[in-house]
Amino acid sequence: MSDTPTTPIEFRRYTQNLSPAIPIAIQQATGQFFEKRNARVAELPEWELLRDVGHRLRLHTLEHLDAYLEQAATSLSAAGVQVHWAMNGAEANAVVLDIARQHNVKTIAKVKSMATEEIALNTALQAAGFQITETDLGEFIIQLAGLGPSHIVVPAVHLKKEEIAQLFKEKLGVEAPPDPEQLTAIARARLREVFLAADMGISGANFLVAETGTLVMVTNEGNGRMCTTLPDLHVAVVAIDKVVPDWESLATLLKLLARSATGQKLSTYTNFITGPRKTKGEHGPRELHVVLLDNGRSRMLASPLTRETLKCIRCGSCLNVCPVYKQVGGYAYGWFISGPIGAVLTPQLLGTKIAAELPYASTLCGACAEVCPVKVPLLDLLRHLRRRVAEGDATTTPIVSPVLRGVARGSAIALGTPWLYRLGARLMPLLQVPVRRGNWIPSLPAPLNRWTMVRPFMPFRARFRRWWKHHKKNE
Amino acid sequence: MTQNRFPNPVLDAVRHSLGYESGAPLPPHPLLPSARAAGTPQAEIALLLQEIDKVSGHTQQLTTHNLDTALGALVETENIRTATVWNTPTLQCLDIAGRLKHLGVTLVPPDAEKHTLAQCDLGVTEADFAIPDSGTLGLLSGPEKPRAVSLLPAVHLALLTPAALRPDLHQVFAEAQHHGYLILITGPSRTADIELTLTLGVHGPRELYVWIFESPGE
Ligand code: SF4
């Protein structure tokens, strides 16, 4: 829905005039998802092992992405799928438009997908006169309302049932009581017509298995199945980072995904589609196209750190635990993806000029990195991107300089070893003699002068232990 | 794999970023935790039924003797008037279509046109696989097993025998990966999109019935 931002994303300004309904709804949703996720994770004693395998598996795939992509393309073609490559969103949209025109398509049924949101495919198709309907219940509702999604899994969570009933009355002309079940029934009937009439189904994919060229799609409502089973033509837009080597790897990733996303052992429907239908009676599309989308990802592969961003399997766990996201919801992040993963992906795809505020939309508490089922190093990425905001996108310097890392390690050892600490405390007053001016340290030599540039330091005194001993004696 | 089988800018950009010699043999990927081991058949069946119930499915253990009673009850509770049944040997052997007709239900061929299938109250299929641990059914497709039968009708009835049981996803995948289509079904269609209230039957079937037959000879 939200088109690609071309002006800076104003995260802070947005958060200042936030409707109070948003944090309440978002906290309810995230709390519920997180609780369910925890229950599922607790059932699996091997969760950490699974996570570790998930992480290594994703990294391995990305490190050899050229080979796996080539294998995927070969398998897709062998299965009768037409493969297209798109360097960016404009190219991908042009491919989809072409296919739609060639087939004289009029109406399109669409399953929500991150890749199509990223390239604003709906806007492109609508501008070209095609009628396109989002068919996930939540997406359908926000499309009617003309809003963007506020949560990755439940995009309309910030709307109350009364508001939805009102919306259905205005936009669909049906009188409905504010009851989730009846509202769902209305949407079901309306969307049935869309599914049965559509000439073309558009989807993304959660995974693409290189070994066999299989598209894997995970849904709960069943609209994904409708869009990929009923129309004669199916186009899937798949980002190149969705590739998995084989079905063995897929099994591990599916276990991680369903548990992390919605706290289910498996989502209600998991589809595995290899090629178009073989006989008409079997159902399924007669023609299947896959558009493999780069859109900035190949660039991210170049550095070992930014590459790790692409391990993400879009489960939404990091959103559910993020204290910032829970206060502001999805809109503030300005694009199709929000929360910690949005804060690291958007600046990398759009540049830190446009997304300068996003790496700062975090307290760096680390909860996100801890729950991530494939161990995306969200914290390291946030820090790296803050550096890029300050120094420009060309910066490849590591997040922390080796010197600083050494100092941090050293002080960790010193603070953790009592005798070393005492020794240090004795030495410090002597070491600061050359820089001390009375009761202040006005400036330090480089590179430490960065600390004193803004304000002078108080000299180090280390009197606490002495004071404590004294205090105890006087009690 | 040859280097320029797919000459295209995306692959070139990926290769450029990775800086690898393309076409180098792939090292083995990380080891996976071993799949879950199966319990006794009885334990597996009990677990399957329990897990399906947890995800709001209706389960029953049956023999051919009480099949008519069960079908009669289903037709009545769900108010079934039209139905469609897969043409698999097991379902034909059990004569599901004949029995339904006998109960006054109109039958539609499973490969009928989508609009016709959408009017059906009941779709009957046979699960190729069942994973007890998650309460999941696996269905393949083919000319006699059309995909929309488990999707368009309001109620989905899946029959299975213990032969369909598999301990884990890994075994299902090992067998299913060379078929053109596999759908894993875990409970009826669901959403929590409106105020996080769980609602069944948003697009797919609103009810899922799973009937398991005892092994022949038991
Ligand atoms: S970064 Fe990790 S936790 Fe966040 S959506 Fe991606 S996979 Fe899930």
Image (cartoon, coloured by chain):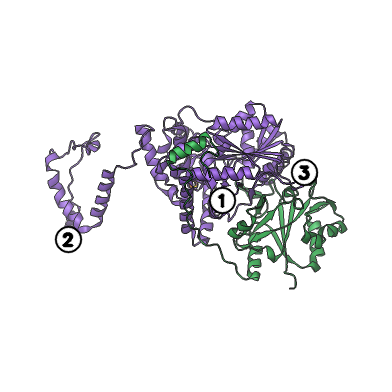
Chain colours: A purple, B green
Q: Outermost residue toward the bottom?
A: B218
- The foreground one among A243 and A371 is A243
Q: Amino acid at mark 2?
A: Lys
For the residue with label 1, is its CB less than 8 Å from the closest atom of ligand 1? no
Does the CB distance between marks 1 and 2 fall below 8 Å?
Answer: no
Can marks 3 and 1 be said to lie on one chain?
no
Q: Amino acid at mark 1?
A: Thr
Does the CB distance between marks 3 and 2 fall below 8 Å?
Answer: no
Q: Secondary structure at mark 2?
A: helix
Residue at position x 61%, y 36% from top? A142
Compare marks 1 and 2 and give the one earlier in the sequence.
1
Looking at the rendered image, the disc whose residue lies closer to the viewer, 3 or 2, is 3
* Residue A427 relative to residue A281: left or right: left
* Quadrant housing the N terminus of chain A: top right
Which disc number belongs to residue A473? Answer: 2
* Residue A142 relative to residue A175: left or right: left
Disc 2 crowd rating (10 Å Cα; few below 14, some 14-19, many 20+) is few
* Quadrant housing the C terminus of chain A: bottom left
Q: Which residue is mark 3?
A: B114
Per the model, the C-alpha gap separating discs 3 and 1 is: 31 Å
Does the CB distance between marks 3 and 1 fall below 8 Å?
Answer: no
Q: Position of residue A6 (x, y in %)?
A: 49, 27
Q: Position of residue A361 (x, y in %)?
A: 42, 38
Label 1: chain?
Answer: A
Q: Position of residue A56 (x, y in %)?
A: 46, 52
Per the model, the C-alpha gap separating discs 1 and 2 is: 58 Å
